[in-house]
Image: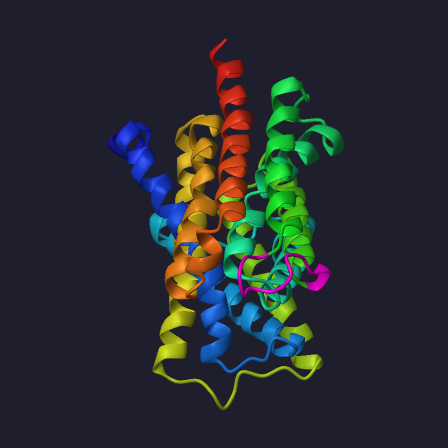
Amino acid sequence: MKNKIDMTNGKVVFLAAGLCCFLWGSAAPAIKIGYSLFRIDPADTASILVFAGVRFMLAGFLVIAYHSLTQRHWIMPPKGSGGAIASLALTQTVLQYLFYYVGLSRASGVHSAIITGTNVFFSMLCASLVFGYEKLDVRKITGCILGFLGISIVNLAGAGPGQGSGFSFLGEGFVMLAQIFYALSGSLIKKHARAYDVVTLSGYQFMAGGLGLWGIGLVWGGTLSGAVGPSALALLLYMVILSAVAYTLWGVLLKYNPVSQVTVYGFMNPMFGVLLSAVFLKESGQALSWTTLVALILVCLGIYVVNREKGAARSR
């Protein structure tokens, strides 16, 4: 009971959600730094997939290991959950991160961070139009328009002084496609959570999806050998912990709190992503350009409008 009370405390929710958003926001600069440390060429898609696969196999193992410790026995996949795990592994890990990792190798961290914020809008549209979990209304549509307007501004206006063109299908376009598969996987999680434990599904789909990415990369000729030093291994470990901790903690918050109360903090994802990309990728010129700032404001405002409406609906 004490744990439940703690996780519903407003300050605890804010700090925990903020930590998750910080970790997710750090993903873009961490991945791009990883390409450098592992000496992966942006055109070497096969090695990019090997890199992603190793990360998610290890992240899935950590999620299951943590869950097993809390249950005091090793957690196995529930009977009959193979289809659920496979569908989630395909959408949430294989397809989402195939497009995200490849796209990120050809797009800036700032642009990628802002585009990632659209997963909130795609998730709402997918839940409404594909799965019928909720209905669209004026305020939800308004939130989507604001968010996508922000994305349009930052991509069509260009990347800022000295940063090159503003949009590339293999760069920003792939990052956007990744958000669509993220949205689809979110609706599938909601569907399968009715029958299976969410954390267990997540851990095993991470391992299965990571194995898939790793296998595709190896068959394609990818490798990480020959450039693995202490810094590269430390970064990989951070990325593994990033996925395992953020996803598990977010799941705990959703378990003990109304969904709207947690997801409203999602506006911090693109904010942290832009700031961390500016610091660690030295993209401050792009991050501080007026197009980026306007786009960031519009995306965050759109996310707030969508989630505020959810909360208002529940309060009535």
Residue at 51% x, 49% y is 200
- Vertical placement of 178 versus 48: above or below? above
User: Is 231 contained in the magenta span?
Assistant: no
From the viewer's perspective, tell me whether residue 14 is left or right of residue 174: left
Residue at 54% x, 20% y is 309
Residue at 35% x, 82% y is 230
In the rendered image, the residue lying farthest to the top is 316
Q: Which contiguous range is marked in magenta?
A: 159-170
Front-most of residues 187 and 283:
283
Name the quarter where the N terminus is drawn. Answer: top left
Pinpoint residue 158: horizontal percent, then vertical percent: 62, 55
- Vertical placement of 233 versus 68: above or below? below
- The quadrant in which residue 299 appears is top right
User: Is 162 contained in the magenta span?
Assistant: yes
From the viewer's perspective, tell me whether residue 104 is left or right of residue 83: left
Pinpoint residue 147: horizontal percent, then vertical percent: 59, 36
Pinpoint residue 138: horizontal percent, then vertical percent: 65, 18
Residue at 51% x, 83% y is 39
Front-most of residues 56 and 41:
41
Residue 226 in view in this figure? yes
- By secondary structure, the bulk of the magenta-drawn segment is best described as loop
From the viewer's perspective, tell me whether residue 26 is left or right of residue 93: left
Front-most of residues 188 and 198:
188
- The quadrant in which residue 134 appears is top right
Front-most of residues 54 and 150:
150
In the rendered image, the residue lying farthest to the front is 161
In the rendered image, the residue lying farthest to the bottom is 226
From the viewer's perspective, tell me whether residue 4 is left or right of residue 247: left
